[in-house]
Amino acid sequence: MNVLRFSDLCDEGRARGRRVFIRADLNVPQDEAGNITEDTRIRASVPCIQLALAGGAAVRVTSHLGRPTEGVFRPEASLAPVAKRLSELLGRPVPLKQDWVAGVDIQPGEVVLLENCRLNKGEKKNDPVLARKMAALCDIFVHDAFGTAHRAEASTYGIAQYAKIACAGPLLAAEIDAITKALANPRRPLVAIVAGSKVSTKLTILQALAAKVDQMVVGGGIANTFLLAAGMPIGKSLAEPGLVGQARSVIEAMKARGAEVPIPTDVVVAKTFAADAPATVKAAADVAPDDLILDIGPQTARKLARQLKAAGTIVWNGPVGVFEFDAFAHGTETIARAIAESDAFSIAGGGDTLAAIAKYGIEKDVGYISTGGGAFLEMLEGKTLPALEILAQRASG
């Protein structure tokens, strides 16, 4: 995808003395007291801000936080905790500015954080009047919030339409490069791990990847539906019997071109869904009517680990079992460690996947960790994300 890159503009000296508007993704979790509990997204946004400051720009940064009602300010929707954390990370004051759409005075070499952009009326519906006002605040618009790229909002799409220059920040550019490397020009074999509670939420992803990958590992409730499609018993496990036909068609489509959906040969079951429920390893064919499948079995995990270690490219979205419960975490841990040990280029995304990566401490051993949830999934489907589409249009126009 051909887009202007902010790093190139800075290398050419085109940011010096300019007003730069960065749309970041600073939507971080907080506790009831408003304390940030996990700051990965803030830390991931720092390089773009530092790049702009080093380039001599006057830097405005904004983000959404939560889902506030437009036009209604409540303290819990404020970016004040984010401004504090940004100040710490940048080692300089980062003032938080309210009511900024009409303009904010700032000098080159300075940075301010603009209050939650979703408080502005018209943000969600991409109101052109609001978008034009935002665009008037900058000479260069930088989109660096991949997690919002699948939404056409005023601060993600409209501003890019009307700004003098619209480009991709380093975080967004890295996402484009990583997903292109994984799907458009992959080193083979290409293995995808798609897991989650329901086939219905990821059916289009499964269908899209079925035409591209050499192996498709399914996990969680999705795997149970595929077990049903393969004629195996699943007891009272979470599944979607109404989608067995679609699961079977994915299996057949893969098989027709010599690819594979590995079906678990053994599983870990319990009688109840609880952290302290006794875990029992069974052959997949021996699952009882009152069993809940909560993980893949050790035999299946070892087989998958061998395949992952031999892969050329790995795309990972979702843990293969209830990894939050230690008794049912072995499958996910085995797969995570196999990915870490593999020479393959690996890309991982999705909230539960990132939690598993953090739990097993393999962050440095994954080729690329995506910061996007819904945007990551839509790119895996092959969809063109609105925010990327407008950046590509501006680059070619």
Image (cartoon, grey):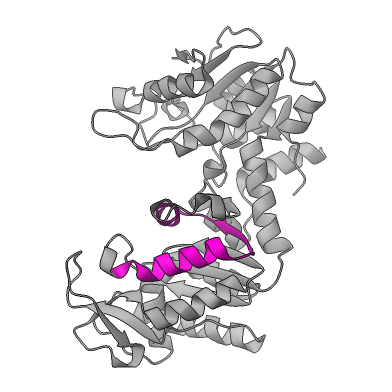
Task: Residue 16 in the image: state x and y as whole percent.
Answer: 75, 15
**Residue 193: image location, x then y, percent:** 51, 68
Relative placement, left or right, of 118 versus 260 is left
331 inside magenta stretch = yes
**Relative to 203, does residue 139 appear above or below in the rendering?**
above
Give percent across and percent down for residue 30. 32, 34
Total tally of numbered discs in the picture: 0
Residue appearing at x 61%, y 33% in the figure: 158
Q: Is residue 127 visible?
A: no
Which image quadrant is residue 69 in? top left
Please report the residue visible at 70 percent of the width from the left and 57 percent of the height from the top: 181
Q: Give the main secondary structure, helix, strand or loop, of the magenta stretch.
A: helix
266 and 121: which is toward the camera: 266
Pick the front one: 227 or 191 = 191
Please state, as top left, top right, bottom left or bottom right, where the C terminus lies in the image. top right
Q: Nearer the viewer, residue 202 or 30?
A: 30
Q: Which residues are magenta?
A: 328-357
Corner quadrant of residue 154: top right
- Quadrant position of residue 149: top right
Image coordinates for residue 17, horizontal then vertical, percent: 73, 12
Tell me, yes or no, whether the highlighted magenta stretch contains residue 177.
Answer: no
